[in-house]
């Protein structure tokens, strides 16, 4: 069967051949894999692309990239998901991290106080989400490793200082991310799909909301259609709402597994992508459970009577699921 590859595939292939850095090579391979049609005629090609991606990632792990100061950073992912904070110097990223987690980043009124990636665990209800603070954009030492961090994360949170012009900050930040071939779906400056770009979910948060002028600047941003939320770490404003916004932006649901004949543990949710089916839950619990599954019983929010469903049943936020084999 012929592959019948579209023109966009060959453009991404050209970018891969011309790429010099591992980040750009990996981005081009990801774009090729996204574009390529999936059928028998492309099975071998898809396998080749995945092997090349695996090889690039393995080489990166064996030989960490270093910045101009000889620094290299690696973040071990923890929790249900990971969200990365990006912004300009003194935008309030580190203060936000310190307010919502047990991390202790350096917080000061001079620029570039964050030198490496600083992770911390944020709790939203019964879900733990890893927040990662990064060096301020403009710190050249981070160019070698921050792009890979952004490409691999689940969510990017753009942090701007509402004491300054937030629109110019946003434009600069998005421009810097574009240099790394990283886009944010909800904050795109145009609707054109760009070959070789990794599109991530994300939103904007404005810090230092204490003054009327800052609140006016936030309203101005929101009036432009920007998905933006304001907070004040100093006064504790908007922190709970921020945690909720991060969870909602991840586009996931919480599902609770109930062993037959036993109660469900409502303190330990299983996190699944929105739109997941019972089959996805079974596979996430154990690789063999999906094959052994005969049916499932599902209790939706506040329902006392379970419904008997099959593996293609669509799950909703808060469902309790009992899988029978």
Image: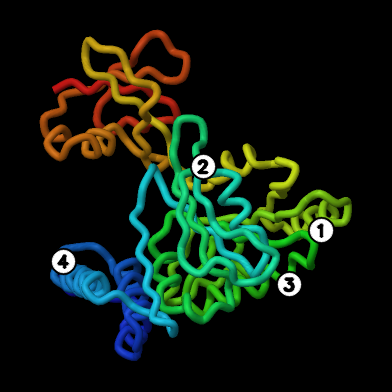
Q: Nearer the viewer, residue 147 or 93?
A: 93
| Cα distance between the residues tagged 1 and 4 | 51 Å
Quadrant in the picture for the N terminus? bottom left
Q: Name the element at disc 2.
A: helix
Dot 2 or dot 3: first in sequence order is 3
Q: Nearer the viewer, mark 3 or mark 4?
A: 3
Q: Give residue 187's position: percent from left, percent from top.
A: 61, 62
Quadrant in the picture for the C terminus? top left
Residue 168 got which mark?
A: 3
Dot 3 or dot 4: first in sequence order is 4
- Could you classify mark 3 by the number of other residues whose Cα lies within 10 Å: few (under 14), some (14-19), or many (20 or more)? few
| Cα distance between the residues tagged 2 and 3 | 27 Å
In the rendered image, which residue does mark 2 sit on? 247
Q: Is residue 155 left or right of residue 324?
A: right
Residue 43 got which mark?
A: 4
Residue 217 got which mark?
A: 1
Residue at x 79%, y 67% (from the top left corner): 165
Q: Name the element at disc 4.
A: helix
Q: Are marks 2 and 3 in contact (CB under 8 Å)?
A: no
């Amino acid at each position: 069967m012929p592959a019948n590859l579209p023109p966009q595939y060959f453009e991404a292939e050209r970018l891969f051949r011309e790429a010099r850095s591992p980040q750009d090579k990996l981005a081009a391979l990801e774009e090729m894999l996204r574009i390529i049609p999936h059928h028998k005629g492309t099975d071998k090609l898809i396998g080749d692309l995945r092997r090349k991606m695996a090889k690039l990632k393995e080489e990166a792990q064996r030989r960490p990239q270093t910045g101009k100061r000889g620094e290299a950073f690696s973040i071990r992912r923890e929790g249900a998901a990971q969200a990365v904070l990006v912004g300009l110097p003194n935008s309030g990223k580190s203060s936000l991290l310190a307010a919502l987690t047990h991390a202790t980043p350096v917080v000061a009124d001079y620029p570039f106080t964050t030198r490496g990636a600083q992770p911390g665990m944020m709790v939203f209800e019964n879900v733990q989400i890893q927040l990662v603070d990064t060096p301020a954009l403009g710190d050249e030492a981070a160019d070698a490793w921050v792009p890979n961090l952004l490409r691999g994360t689940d969510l990017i949170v753009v942090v701007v200082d509402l004491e300054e012009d937030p629109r110019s900050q946003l434009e600069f930040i998005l421009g810097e991310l574009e240099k790394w071939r990283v886009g944010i779906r909800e904050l795109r400056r145009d609707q054109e799909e760009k070959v070789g770009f990794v599109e991530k979910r994300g939103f904007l948060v404005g810090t230092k909301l204490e003054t009327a002028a800052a609140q006016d600047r936030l309203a101005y941003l929101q009036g432009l259609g920007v998905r933006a939320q304001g907070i004040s770490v100093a006064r504790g404003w908007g922190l709970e709402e921020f945690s909720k916004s991060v969870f909602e932006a991840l586009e996931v649901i919480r599902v609770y597994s109930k062993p037959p004949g036993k109660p469900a543990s409502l303190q330990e949710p299983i996190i699944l992508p929105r739109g997941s089916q019972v089959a996805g839950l079974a596979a996430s619990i154990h690789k063999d459970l999906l094959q052994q599954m005969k049916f499932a019983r599902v209790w939706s929010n506040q329902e006392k009577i379970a419904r008997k469903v099959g593996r293609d049943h669509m799950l909703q936020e808060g469902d309790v699921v009992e899988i029978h084999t």
